[in-house]
Amino acid sequence: MRIRVVRLTELPILQDIERAAGRCFRDVGMPEIAEDEPLPVDELARYCHAELAWVVADDADTPVAYLIADPVDGNFHVEQVSVHPDVARRRLGHMLLEHLAAHARSEGSPALTLTTFTEVPWNAPYYARCGFHPMDDATLTPGLRKIRENDAAHGLDRWPRVCMRRDL
């Protein structure tokens, strides 16, 4: 498997990956998250045009995992990373995070950030194993505060959430 940029024709595949990956949230009592629709194709296209969207492609060159990111306050913010459950536990998410870290370093960015659920095993505990640490509210940048506000407006704060940072 290899990492490459996302092709515009593959955006519906990214949505399918996210839907499949999201089904796991039912098992931890979060059916609303499992049923949440992925980003629309036009919004995913924005990440492609900004060159901030990557996939892990299988041997047939079909995407099986993806990551999209945004520049936020001088860092790169992981907007979404999803791995299809058929290929889970193969470190594909970690590969994508490392790819983003290398890209961020090449751009002179000091850190990666993300927001995630604290009590979901494949969320905050996983990201901690990938080198991210929780940020307290006092250290959030203006852009991260806005992201947290958007999370809350989308109903995500119904479950405990945290902003995390990985220094590069």
Image (spheres, helix red, strand yellow):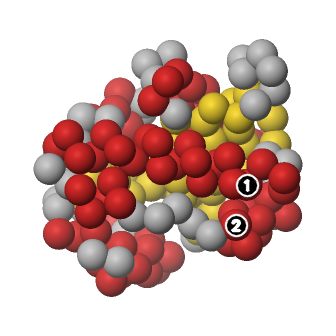
Counting from the top left corner in percent of width and height, residue 2 is at 76, 22
Q: Secondary structure at mark 1?
A: helix
Q: Position of residue 3 (x, y in %)?
A: 75, 29
Please indicate whether residue 117 sits to the left or right of residue 29 in the image: right
* Alpha carbon distance from label 1 to label 2: 6 Å
Residue 104 visible (yes or no)? no
Query: Nearer the N terminus, badge 1 or badge 2?
Result: 1
Residue at image point 39% right, 47% down: 22
Q: Position of residue 150 (x, y in %)?
A: 40, 79
Quadrant where the N terminus lies? top right
Report helix, strand or loop for mark 2.
helix
Identify the residue shown where x is 27% and y is 75%. Answer: 155
Q: What is the number of the mark on residue 121?
A: none
- Which residue is the site of mark 1? 11
118 to the left or right of 83: left
Nearest to the observer: residue 110 or residue 97: 97
Q: Residue at x 62, y 70 (%)?
A: 40
**Left or right position of 111 against 57:** left
Task: Give whichever of 133, 13 is nearer the camera.
Answer: 13
Q: Using the rendered image of the protein, determine whether residue 89 is visible from the camera's viewpoint.
A: yes
Q: Please tell me whether residue 35 is drawn above or below residue 152 in the rendered image.
A: above
Q: Residues within 10 Å of mark 1 (few under 14, many from 20)?
A: many
- Label 1 is placed on what type of residue? Leu
The three-letter amino acid code for the residue at tag 2 is Val
- Residue at position x 61%, y 35% from top? 65
- Asked if the residue at tag 2 contacts the one at tag 1, i.e. Cβ–Cβ closer than 8 Å, the answer is yes
Q: Considering the image in quadrants, where does the C terminus appear?
A: top right
Residue underneath mark 2? 41
Residue 130 point in image, percent of width and height = 43, 30
- Residue 54, quarter of the rendered image: top right
Q: How many labels, in total?
A: 2
| Dot 2 alpha-carbon crowd within 10 angstroms: few under 14, some 14 to 19, many 20 or more | some
